[in-house]
Image (spheres, rainbow, N blue to C red):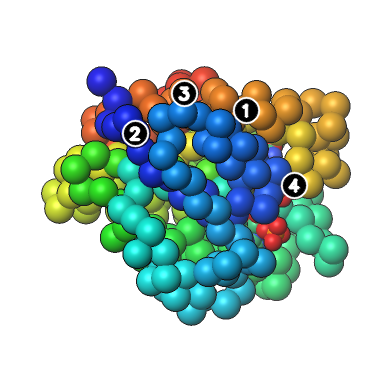
Amino acid sequence: MGLLPKPFRALVIGSSGTIGSAFMRLLENNPACAKVEGISRHSIYPIDYRLPETIESSAHSLAALGPFQLIINTIGLLHSEKWMPEKKLADLNHAQLNELMNINAIGPALTIKNFSKLLDPQNSVMATLSAKVGSIEDNRLGGWYSYRASKAALNMLIKTAAIELKRTKPNIAMIVLHPGTVNSNLSKPFRGQEIGRNADDAVKDMFHVLESATKEDSGSFLSYSGERLPW
Ligand SMILES: NC(=O)c1ccc[n+]([C@@H]2O[C@H](COP(=O)([O-])OP(=O)(O)OC[C@H]3O[C@@H](n4cnc5c(N)ncnc54)[C@H](OP(=O)(O)O)[C@@H]3O)[C@@H](O)[C@H]2O)c1
């Protein structure tokens, strides 16, 4: 049986994004979800990975609304107005590597540090969105250096946190989740509209994976279909 109790309280981090806002809609319409809070750069209790102190202050402010049985972090970055994913070694640059490590790995790790304190120690699930392209084993095409490396670093940070939490809070599942290709701002420059799925369909599948998650699943890299992905 899954860890997620009924009713449960949820928090979506990155609720302004395509997948984040779809999770908000799904949870707002789920009768088992007693309350869902959403935070982003421009929400009340803002969280901005370019201002790392906001991670702790946001968690501190939200503590009074917890504990939460489900926390989903959807924050992530692939491209910006200044650069696109690298196609070759010659494209590597410090600013891009630094920014993607910061937004995709360091920010989410500090989010786990600060927000795992808001999880219900009796039974809860915390999921962070990663990407299959962060799998080292599955990397056959190359390219996208900084995005791939930042998601691989994220995966290691979450796996390590899951091992620690298994000892201290064994009824929490810490999950790494791949959403599949979803039509969003992030995927738009890469034919996301043509090859990506609708975000509402993707979150329906991901929620099913999260509501079925058990404590044995903690520290797993799971696809939206429930498939275990190679690290
Ligand atoms: N779409 C896909 O095909 C796909 C595939 C694999 C993995 N993913 C992963 O899924 C997650 C969600 O992606 P999405 O498709 O929903 O992308 P999206 O629509 O671009 O949403 C990205 C979210 O990240 C937030 N964000 C970006 N930089 C931030 C910062 N410095 N501080 C705080 N928040 C920041 C955005 O906030 P603002 O609204 O303030 O900009 C937004 O809420 C990401 O982790 C992504 O890597 C997506």
82 and 209: which is toward the camera: 209
Q: Residue at left 50%, top 29%? A: 30
| Amino acid, disc 1 | Ala
The residue carrying mark 4 is 186
The residue carrying mark 3 is 208
Q: Percent position (x, y) of residue 71? A: 42, 47
Instruction: Evaluate if marks 4 and 2 touch, with contact meaning CB atoms under 8 Å apart.
Output: no
| Amino acid, disc 4 | Leu
Query: Is residue 189 something one can see in this rendering?
Result: yes
195 and 33: which is toward the camera: 33
Tell me the SS state at disc 4: loop
User: What is the number of the mark on residue 202?
Assistant: 1
Tell me the SS state at disc 2: loop
Q: Percent position (x, y) of residue 172? A: 26, 43
Answer with left or right where residue 206 lies relative to residue 41: left
Query: Is residue 100 something one can see in this rendering?
Result: no
The residue carrying mark 2 is 7
